[in-house]
Image (tube, grey):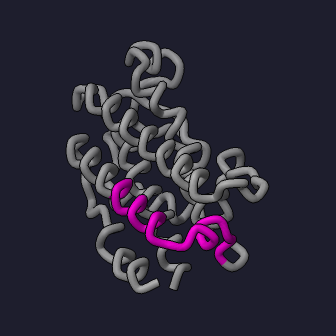
């Protein structure tokens, strides 16, 4: 398990990116490092609950579930999103401010709700299932960063998207949240392997 402990440090610290290019790089790095961590642990550990918490597999499935709908949202025309969710009335929050708001919501009892992974039966081929889970997550994150990378900076701060816990976020804030949320879960996952 020394390998898992070694990778659990700064590899999951995204810093505080704000520009979409930096957010994309941070999410890509987190995905690579998270995949490396998940591949380095015994497959039985990948599917085993971490004490009374989600298994590493469930963490990754949760991250995939949370990001999947965003791929479509960032591909829709901005006028359609503005018509559906309104225009932003204040500037986008910084990474640190959004992280603090999210952590306050968690402390107040917010949960994953419909984005909680459903329990699965033990897979017939655990290695193949692990590869599938990690490949889906990487694919979703890759298409997400491609989609949000086409947005102009001004639109990122004007268009809003719905978040189940934090309400309506600007498109930039949603990208920030996605990066922080990924780092948050990978840090939890890695910390519970010790």
> Bounds of the magenta span?
30-50
Say which residue appears at 67% left-offset and 57% top-offset.
111
In front: 168, or 8? 8
The x and y percentages for residue 70 are 48, 34
In front: 106, or 149? 149
Indicate yes or no whether the magenta region holds residue 31.
yes
The answer to whether 27 is drawn above or below residue 81 in the figure is below
Kindly indicate the quadrant of the structure image that contains residue 60: bottom right
Left or right of 122 in this view: 112: left
Kindly tell me whether residue 94 is visible in this rendering. Answer: no
Kindly indicate the quadrant of the structure image that contains residue 90: top left
In front: 96, or 13? 13
Left or right of 60 in this view: 8: left
Left or right of 137 in this view: 173: left
Say which residue appears at 41% left-offset and 61% top-offset.
34
Left or right of 158 in this view: 188: right
Say which residue appears at 47% left-offset and 59% top-offset.
101
Say which residue appears at 46% left-offset and 14% top-offset.
80
Indicate yes or no whether the magenta region holds residue 63.
no
Report the magenta stretch's main SS.
Answer: helix
The x and y percentages for residue 175 are 37, 43
Kindly tell me whether residue 60 is visible in this rendering. Answer: yes
The x and y percentages for residue 156 are 31, 32
The answer to whether 72 is drawn above or below residue 181 in the figure is above
């Amino acid at each position: 398990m020394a390998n898992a402990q070694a990778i659990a440090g700064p590899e999951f610290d995204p810093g505080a990116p704000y520009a979409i290019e930096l957010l994309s790089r941070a999410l890509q790095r987190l995905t690579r490092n998270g995949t490396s961590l998940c591949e380095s642990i015994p497959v039985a550990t990948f599917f085993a609950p971490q004490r009374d918490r989600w298994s590493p597999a469930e963490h990754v499935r949760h991250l995939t579930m949370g990001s999947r709908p965003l791929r479509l949202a960032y591909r829709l025309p901005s006028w359609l999103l503005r018509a559906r969710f309104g225009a932003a009335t204040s500037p986008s929050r910084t990474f640190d401010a959004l992280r603090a708001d999210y952590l306050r919501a968690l402390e107040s009892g917010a949960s994953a709700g419909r984005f909680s992974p459903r329990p699965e039966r033990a897979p017939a081929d655990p290695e193949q299932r692990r590869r599938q889970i990690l490949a889906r997550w990487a694919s979703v994150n890759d298409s997400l960063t491609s989609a949000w990378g086409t947005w102009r900076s001004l639109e990122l701060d004007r268009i809003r998207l719905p978040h189940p816990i934090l309400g309506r976020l600007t498109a930039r804030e949603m990208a920030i949240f996605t990066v922080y949320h990924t780092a948050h879960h990978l840090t939890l996952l890695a910390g519970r392997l010790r």
